[in-house]
């Protein structure tokens, strides 16, 4: 059964029982993504890592390696 079919079945059952229908699939995707981002930022702060720019710095190190000194 697909997500859409399950949603319609749940909506039909809620209507028959006089309950509030469930939210449609994907209605809370952006909120979930924001909460996940906030959680990852929180974990970075707790672990004493920088919160912003980690990916950009890592890619920069890969694309533009600094030459090693000959000391």
Image (cartoon, rainbow, N blue to C red):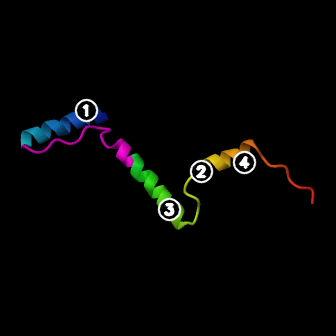
What crowding class fits label 1: few (fewer than 14 Cα within 10 Å), some (14-19), or many (20 or more)?
A: few
Magenta segment, principal secondary structure? loop
Question: Which residue does the numbered mark 2 point to in the structure image?
Answer: 53
For marks 2 and 1, the one nearer the N-term is 1
For marks 4 and 3, the one nearer the N-term is 3
Per the image, label 3 sits on a secondary structure element best described as helix
For marks 4 and 2, the one nearer the N-term is 2
The residue lying at 47 percent from left, 61 percent from top is: 42
Label 2 – label 3 distance at C-alpha: 15 Å
Label 2 – label 1 distance at C-alpha: 41 Å
For marks 4 and 1, the one nearer the N-term is 1
What crowding class fits label 4: few (fewer than 14 Cα within 10 Å), some (14-19), or many (20 or more)?
A: few
Which residue is farthest right?
Answer: 71
For marks 1 and 3, the one nearer the N-term is 1
The label nearer to you, 4 versus 1, is 4
The residue lying at 32 percent from left, 43 percent from top is: 28
Label 4 – label 1 distance at C-alpha: 47 Å
The label nearer to you, 1 versus 3, is 3
Q: Confirm or deny contact between disc 4 and disc 3 (CB under 8 A).
A: no
Task: Using the image, tell me which numbered label, if any, was put on residue 61.
Answer: 4
- The magenta stretch is 18-32
Task: Using the image, tell me which numbered label, if any, was put on residue 43.
Answer: 3
Residue 62 lies within the magenta run:
no
């Amino acid at each position: 059964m697909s997500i859409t079919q399950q949603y319609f079945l749940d909506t039909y059952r809620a209507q028959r029982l006089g309950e509030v229908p469930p939210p449609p699939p994907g209605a809370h995707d952006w909120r979930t993504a924001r909460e996940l981002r906030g959680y990852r930022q929180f974990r970075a702060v707790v672990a004493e890592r920088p919160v912003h720019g980690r990916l950009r710095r890592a890619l920069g190190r890969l694309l533009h390696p600094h030459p090693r000194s000959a000391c």
